[in-house]
Amino acid sequence: MEALMIRERYKVVRVIRAQENYALLEAVDIAERETPLCLLNLYEGELLHRYTRICSGIRKEECPSFRGMFLENGTLIVAFDDCNGQAIDTLFYLGDKWKWEDRILFAEQLLHEALALANLPPEVSCAAMLSENVLFDLTAEKVRLRYMLPPMAEMNARELVLLTADEIKKILPLRLDSCASERALHERLNRGDFHSIVPLYAYWREMVPKMREEREQFKKGGFIRRGLTLLYRAIRKLIKRGGNV
């Protein structure tokens, strides 16, 4: 069976997603040697004009993965570099398999990615921050965002913050040994205190040294003191849930 070619340049490898007026294809750019794998977002019908307007706001200097956009037989095609990695929900749903410092590192990288997204159109930035697009390259120890851009309702900067907050809470979940500053971070994320990525990132930078300091103090407390602290926290957690001790 002959492979599907688009513009005699993109050789389609597989269809990743398909729905009404939208599809995502994995393709090989036969004209590109260094990074041949790419993602092609296809829009038709009522989505064509809307995503032409949205994606025309993407600038290469703000989104290095962006390859460009073009029309092909009445279909809008928006191309991005592909990336490797495991989705966040397959790695951090347990949380305790990761060292605390590793989780801090990944959360920091995720916030850097969110900062880079902040200048993109919200429908693009919010789609990139969906859980299915937040990937972790464990070999390179890097967070990578996949630009699968399915149709989304009108988005804004605050939606990007809320999505980012959800991912941070997965990477750095609350546990019995979580310190006061970690709990304060979660409280602010749960309340939705931040209306853009910049103040969230600034608060994160302020809290990380405090979290490290409190964690070191907790480790220095000795086995008995740590055990009693954890027991006290477990009892409080049961009481809040209405359980019996």
Image (spheres, rainbow, N blue to C red):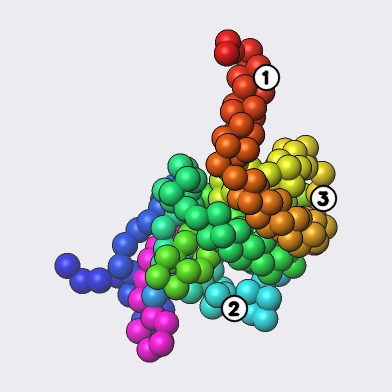
Residue lying furthest top in this view?
244
Task: Give the total number of marks visible in the rendering.
Answer: 3
Q: Secondary structure at mark 3?
A: loop
For mark 2, what is the residue?
A: 64
Q: Residues within 10 Å of mark 2 (few under 14, many from 20)?
A: few
Task: Tell which tag, 1 or 3, sits nearer the viewer.
Answer: 1
Task: Between residue 25 and residue 116, name the one nearer to us.
Answer: 116
Could you tell me if the residues under marks 2 and 3 are in contact, i.e. CB atoms within 8 Å?
Answer: no
Disc sitting over residue 195 in the figure: 3
Q: Is residue 101 above or below residue 56?
A: above
Where residue 193 appears, x then y in whole percent? 82, 44
Where residue 97 appears, x then y in whole percent? 43, 49
Quadrant where the C terminus is found in the figure: top right
Q: Residue at x 53, y 60 (%)?
A: 102
Q: Residue at x 64, y 29 (%)?
A: 233
For mark 1, what is the residue?
A: 240
Task: Tell which tag, 1 or 2, sits nearer the viewer.
Answer: 1
Q: Secondary structure at mark 1?
A: helix
Q: Is residue 172 above or below residue 175?
A: below
Q: Is residue 138 toward the left or the right of residue 217 in the image?
A: left
Q: Is residue 242 visible?
A: yes
